[in-house]
Image (cartoon, rainbow, N blue to C red):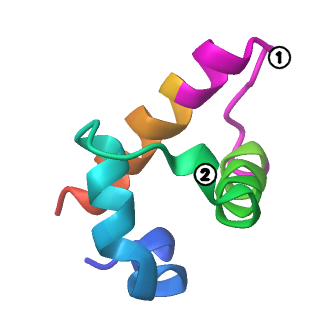
Amino acid sequence: MTTYIVKKFGSQLDFLWEAVNGESDLRTNQKLYKKICKYYKEQGITFPGDAHFDYDTVLDCLYEDINL
């Protein structure tokens, strides 16, 4: 099953994998990062506002969604 993230951001999949694997920082592409955060907020994921915790939460969610 293909997830929304894979469908919507398929052209950025390599970059997303690099971020999940700690090879790059997703926040270097703020536009993409904000879109992904917005999607997860709409899915009910809670972000408490701590930048480090929020980023780790996004990476955890991404791992689950792109690790097919």
Range of the magenta residues? 42-55
Looking at this view, is 41 or 13 the one in front? 13
Secondary structure at badge 1 equals loop
Name the quarter where the N terminus is drawn.
bottom left
Q: Is 58 displayed left or right of 67 in the figure?
A: right
Q: Quadrant of residue 45?
A: top right
How crowded pointer 2 is (Cα within 10 Å; few <14, some 14-19, many 20+) is rated as: few
Q: Quadrant of residue 39?
A: bottom right
Q: Decide: is 54 above or below 38.
A: above
Amino acid type shown at disc 1: Gly
Q: Label 2 amino acid?
A: Thr
**Where does the image place residue 46, in percent across and percent down from the top left?**
73, 25
Q: Residue furthest left?
A: 68
Along the viewing direction, whichever of 41 and 27 lies nearer the viewer: 27
Q: Position of residue 33 (x, y in %)?
A: 66, 54
The residue lying furthest to the right in this view is: 49
Q: Secondary structure at mark 2?
A: helix
Across and down, in percent, residue 50 comes to 75, 11
Q: Quadrant of the C terminus?
A: bottom left
Residue 57 relative to residue 21: left or right: right
* Front label number (1 vs 2): 2
Residue at label 2?
28
Residue at image coords 72%, 39%: 44
Magenta-span inclusion, residue 57: no
Q: Which residue is mark 1?
A: 49
Residue at 38% from the left image edge and 60% from the top image edge: 16
Residue 38 lies, with reference to residue 46, above or below; the image says below
Q: Residue at x 34, y 73 (%)?
A: 13
**Mark 1 to mark 2 CA distance (whole Å):** 18 Å
